[in-house]
Image (cartoon, grey):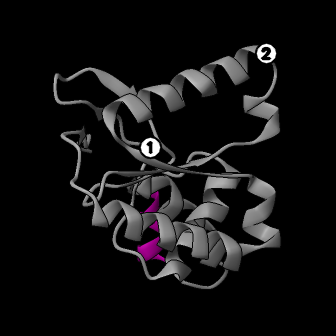
């Protein structure tokens, strides 16, 4: 990322926040809630997560674009806010997405953004439990399509 190169070539003084934001953008976080989710995930001890990558089923059909994706166990993490998901159209899209996840055999964890700040330990416990459950079952034949930069 060109901005990170520029930051690296100058003084580090006063660059902590811009560096963090640029890192979060580089790994795929697209919202403040996802930024908070990234911080919670870092504390979880869970393996690498991919952020905002399209997931397809065995036939190549698009399933969803999870906020975070644990590819080794086919676990999706959705950070679903009331503002974006719970008007009539948003709720219908969320139900359709979750139905596609279920049809593809994908385990999914849904988290309200407020819990990322108010109960990060509880969110971490839920993510770990879901990860362990997903790891214990056969992995469904789904793939994330990782975009090259």
The answer to whether residue 19 shows anywhere in this view is no
Magenta stretch encompasses residue 114 = no
Q: Quadrant of the C terminus?
A: top left
> Badge 2 is on which residue?
88
- Considering only order in the chain, which callout, 1 or 2, is on the residue closer to the N terminus? 1
At x 46%, y 58%, the residue is: 3
109 is higher (above) or lower (below) than 101: below
> Badge 1 is on which residue?
52
Magenta stretch encompasses residue 5 = yes
71 is higher (above) or lower (below) than 20: above
Magenta residues?
3-10
At x 67%, y 18%, the residue is: 92
Disc 1, SS:
loop
Say which of 6 and 28 sits in front: 28
At x 67%, y 64%, the residue is: 36
Estimate the x, y position of residue 97 in percent, counting from the top left: 51, 27
Estimate the x, y position of residue 58 in percent, counting from the top left: 17, 30
């Amino acid at each position: 990322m060109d901005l990170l190169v520029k930051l690296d070539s100058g003084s580090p003084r006063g660059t902590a926040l811009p560096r963090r934001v640029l890192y979060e953008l580089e790994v795929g976080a697209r919202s403040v809630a996802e930024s908070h989710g990234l911080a919670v995930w870092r504390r979880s001890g869970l393996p690498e997560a991919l952020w905002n990558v399209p997931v397809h089923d065995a036939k190549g059909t698009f399933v969803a674009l999870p906020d975070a994706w644990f590819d080794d166990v086919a676990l999706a993490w959705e950070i679903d806010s009331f503002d974006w998901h719970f008007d009539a159209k948003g709720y219908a899209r969320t139900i359709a997405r979750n139905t596609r996840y279920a049809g593809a055999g994908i385990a999914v964890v849904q988290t309200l953004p407020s819990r990322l700040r108010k109960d990060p330990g509880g969110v971490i416990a839920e993510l770990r439990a879901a990860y362990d459950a997903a790891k214990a079952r056969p992995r469904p034949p789904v793939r994330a399509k990782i975009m090259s930069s």
